[in-house]
Amino acid sequence: MIGTDSSLGFRVPDEAALYIFMVYWPPPKPATLNGDAAPGTRLLASSESAVRAWPGSTGAAKVGGNYGSALVEHALAKKQGYDQVLWLYGTDRQITEAGSTNIFVMWKTASGTVEMVTSPLDENNLTLAGNTRRSIIELSREMFAPGKAEEGMECQVLERIITMAEVESAALEGRLIGAFVVGTAFWIQEVSEVMYNGQTIEVGMGSARHVSLLRERMTDIMYGREENSWGYIVEES
């Protein structure tokens, strides 16, 4: 979107033009480690001095200004063989985003309940309000709800603050089931590991069938194999 009126200066334009581009986007290539492609998405947790979005900023919107300052940290992650930066915020190291995608974490609680958790959309605007994020939440609450889910697939879908301490604890106690990132370009990719404070947190891939089922369902909707109110057919011209 660009301003198209005749003004020049720091102000909200009276007129604007919105451009929508529809392009084929190839699947993301995993980072290479020692020359070999590593399975899954590998994340490097951001340093305490690096911040993607501040409370009250435009972090919830997909705007270029959010990512210009993030490129330095992203370049460092790529140089070390990682795919994306896991963006953390605050002294309690809250998980907000992974690169330019939303992230979901799956674990079992101490009582054995399976949870699918993603960071919330709130007044702080730290989390990207992604369309794919919203789609995953809505589908998950439909597909994995008690009484509707396949046997062994029930889970609670929660939007709340997630800290790295919780992820570490779940991994150490064997309760961490999986994690995945979602976005328009990145689609739905499982996370294989997270580097945090010099320690690698291994994330089990394939342990949560929820991810493959969501990917299949979303793909069917996208390609028109499943009739859905989300779908809109664009005729070729």
Image (spheres, rainbow, N blue to C red):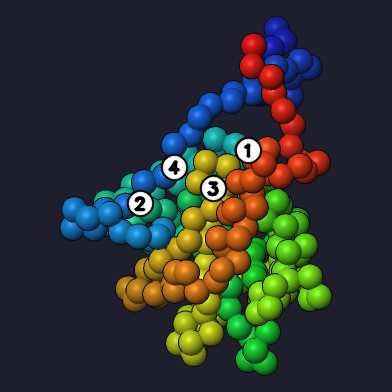
Tag count in the figure? Answer: 4
**171 in relation to 117, above or below:** below
Looking at this view, is 153 or 183 the one in front?
Answer: 153
Q: Tell me which numbered mark, 3 or 2, is placed earlier along the sequence.
A: 2
Residue name at image x 64 percent, y 11 percent: 237
Q: Amino acid at mark 4?
A: Pro
Task: Name the one closer to the observer, 224 or 169.
Answer: 224
Mark 2 against mark 1, which lies toward the viewer? 1
Q: Farthest residue toward the front?
A: 225
Task: Judge depth for marks 1 and 4 and give the one in front.
Answer: 1
**Mark seen at residue 30:** 2
Disc 4 element: loop
Label 2, label 1: how far apart the Cα atoms are: 24 Å
Marks 2 and 1, the one that precedes in the sequence: 2
Please tell me the numbered disc located at residue 187: 3
The front one of 149 and 46 is: 149
Name above or below for residue 16 compared with residue 92.
above
Distance from disc 1 to disc 4, alpha carbons, whole Å, reads 15 Å
Question: At label 2, which amino acid type do we have?
Answer: Pro
Local secondary structure at mark 1 = loop
Q: In whole angstroms, how far apart are the C-alphas of marks 3 and 1?
A: 14 Å
Marks 3 & 4, CB-CB < 8 Å contact? yes
Secondary structure beneath dot 2 equals loop
**How far, Cα to Cα, is label 3 from label 4?**
8 Å
Q: Residue at x 49, y 90 (%)?
A: 173
User: Is residue 38 toward the left or the right of residue 119 in the image?
Assistant: left
